[in-house]
């Protein structure tokens, strides 16, 4: 992807095509296998409930802070799926299936930017990485956002290449496709700060001497196309009730029993994690640490090498990747609130940089082809082994640079555990708890869902707050999650810690949930 006219990139060829098909199959298998192994997370149960409301013509309720595309896809799955499938698996299925197109899109983007070998290796990272697989198995908007982000960047790369080749018709088609991808991004998640990505990429490419030219009138037309497609995919944004809900959500008002976390445990320290709260907030390098510790170590090292090469050379391909990374990382810095799943839309960029670094490194070594094959096996083998060893909980993987699996309880516990184990904890309480007992939980809606499903609508549920939990004169069961330690509950958790646990739920061989039984009024003093 240079600054002058060049012939189209070579085709994949028979063997590379076969390898890409195998990567797609492997990526889908890892994402779909035992998809309902974990109970719902708090965020996910709201997607399940909203999708079921959609089937009855109700497009309001909770979760309106997110666009409707993913929930509409879940509703379609629920409508046509067999009754034997679990709600958890059905809710996650659209996102898990999107892993197949994502692998293909990354491969084609990598081929355009850095060549066929880099495209295949980047696709292997996205297909096999426990970070990509694990976070691709959850029902969060970031998964679809990732697919459409890659498609947008691919369209920008192809439009630029078409302009360099002098093909006005192809350039126009790719620009329209890019507008559609941008619309789908915003119909997946309201991440408005990334809107300038196409403009910034175009501007930097033009500054480097690119022949790609888009007049202002064309930008206006493309914006209109994107806006029309966005409204077609997310027409609920036009409803006054949506804006009322969003106004309360942005203001931080309490909306129903949604789990709220004003802080985030990262590397053993609690940080402020509310939007636009900068003092004492989660460090801006949170997602760089995520890349360093959640990708397999060889991938992380090669990605750092590729990033260094990109910063030094700044070719058109590098500028496109750097704009992609810069816009998202700056967006997360401005938003100030951070979560591990936010890394998903930039994970393919790190995969592409790692693949680029491997190709460049191999070129510096004797017997380039053999060296590149060894690096490809090293990268893909480590990523695949990490995923396979951690299934069905690949999010729990931490590489040796981050301290290995022993660090999962302190490094990114909120994001990695993602409420795994709550379903089993509630089932045990439902089976053994006294009538009208209390439950203390920081996922009250999720706990209510499973308690009702287990036939215990009599159980009263309170958030883990010193002012409210275990205050009534009945036995109280407190669900303490490794991933949900916050400022608002740490005083209660510290009081519970010396007590014997009533039951424990292990996830991935480590305690994810501890349940304590205390007498009513235990926290009244």
Image (spheres, helix red, strand yellow):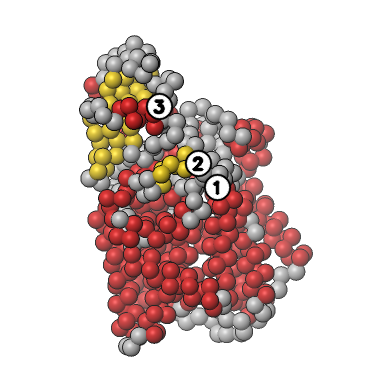
For label 1, the residue is 336
Q: Residue at x 56, y 62 (%)?
A: 326
Kindly tell me whether residue 180 is visible in this rendering. Answer: no
Q: Residue at x 48, y 73 (%)?
A: 308
Q: Nearer the viewer, residue 205 or 493?
A: 493
Disc with the residue nearer the chain's start (1 vs 3): 1
196 is higher (above) or lower (below) than 485: below
- Image quadrant occupied by the C terminus: top left
Indicate the secondary structure of the residue bearing disc 3. Answer: loop
How far separated are the C-alphas under marks 1 and 2?
9 Å
> Measured from the top left, where is residue 128 in percent x and y?
34, 61
Indicate the secondary structure of the residue bearing disc 1. Answer: loop
Do labels 1 and 2 touch, CB within 8 Å? yes
> Measured from the top left, where is residue 239 in percent x and y?
66, 36
> Measured from the top left, where is residue 309 in percent x and y?
48, 76
Disc with the residue nearer the chain's start (1 vs 2): 2
For label 2, the residue is 272
Task: Say the numbered circle drawn on residue 464.
Answer: 3
């Amino acid at each position: 992807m240079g600054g002058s006219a060049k012939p189209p990139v070579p085709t994949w060829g028979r063997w590379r095509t076969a390898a890409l098909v195998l990567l797609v199959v492997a990526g889908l298998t890892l994402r779909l296998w035992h998809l309902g192994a974990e109970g719902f997370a708090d965020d996910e149960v709201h997607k399940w409930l909203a999708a079921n409301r959609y089937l009855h013509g109700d497009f309001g309720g909770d979760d309106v802070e997110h666009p409707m595309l993913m929930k509409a896809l879940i509703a379609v799955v629920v409508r046509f799926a067999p009754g034997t499938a679990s709600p958890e698996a059905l809710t996650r299925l659209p996102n898990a299936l999107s892993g197949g197109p994502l692998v293909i899109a990354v491969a084609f983007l990598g081929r355009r930017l850095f060549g066929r070998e880099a495209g295949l290796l980047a696709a292997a990272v996205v297909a096999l990485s426990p970070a990509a697989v694990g976070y691709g198995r959850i029902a969060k908007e970031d998964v679809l956002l990732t697919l459409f982000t890659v498609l947008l960047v691919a369209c920008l790369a192809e439009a630029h290449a078409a302009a360099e080749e002098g093909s006005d018709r192809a350039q126009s088609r790719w620009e329209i496709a890019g507008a559609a991808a941008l619309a789908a991004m915003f119909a997946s998640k309201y991440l408005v700060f990334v809107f300038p990505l196409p403009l910034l990429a175009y501007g930097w490419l033009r500054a480097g001497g690119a022949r790609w030219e888009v007049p202002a009138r064309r930008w206006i037309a493309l914006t209109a196309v994107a806006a029309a497609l966005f409204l077609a995919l997310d027409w609920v944004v036009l409803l006054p009730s949506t804006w009322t809900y969003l106004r309360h959500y942005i203001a931080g008002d309490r909306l129903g029993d949604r789990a709220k976390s004003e802080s985030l445990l990262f590397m053993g320290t609690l940080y402020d994690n509310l939007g636009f709260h900068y003092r004492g907030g989660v460090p801006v390098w949170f997602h760089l640490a995520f890349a360093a510790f959640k990708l397999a170590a060889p991938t992380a090292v090669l990605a750092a090498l590729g990033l260094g090469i990109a910063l030094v050379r700044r070719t058109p391909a590098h500028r496109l990747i750097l704009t992609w990374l810069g816009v998202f990382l700056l967006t997360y810095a401005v938003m100030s609130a951070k979560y591990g799943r936010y890394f998903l839309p930039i994970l393919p960029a790190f995969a592409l940089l790692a693949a680029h670094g491997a190709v460049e490194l191999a070129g510096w070594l004797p017997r380039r082809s053999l060296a590149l094959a060894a690096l490809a096996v090293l990268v893909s083998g480590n990523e695949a082994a990490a995923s396979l060893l951690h299934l069905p909980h690949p999010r729990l993987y931490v590489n040796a640079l981050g301290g290995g699996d022993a660090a999962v309880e302190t490094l990114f516990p909120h994001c990695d555990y993602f409420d795994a184990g709550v379903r089993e904890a509630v089932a045990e309480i439902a089976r053994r708890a006294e009538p009208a007992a209390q439950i203390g939980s920081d996922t009250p809606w999720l706990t209510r869902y499973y308690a009702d499903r287990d036939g215990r609508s009599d159980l009263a549920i309170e958030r883990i707050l010193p002012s409210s939990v275990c205050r009534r004169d009945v036995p109280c069961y407190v669900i303490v999650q490794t991933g949900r330690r916050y400022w608002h509950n740490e005083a209660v958790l510290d009081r519970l810690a010396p007590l014997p646990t009533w039951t424990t739920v292990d996830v991935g061989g480590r305690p994810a949930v501890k349940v304590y039984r205390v007498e009513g009024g235990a926290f009244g003093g």
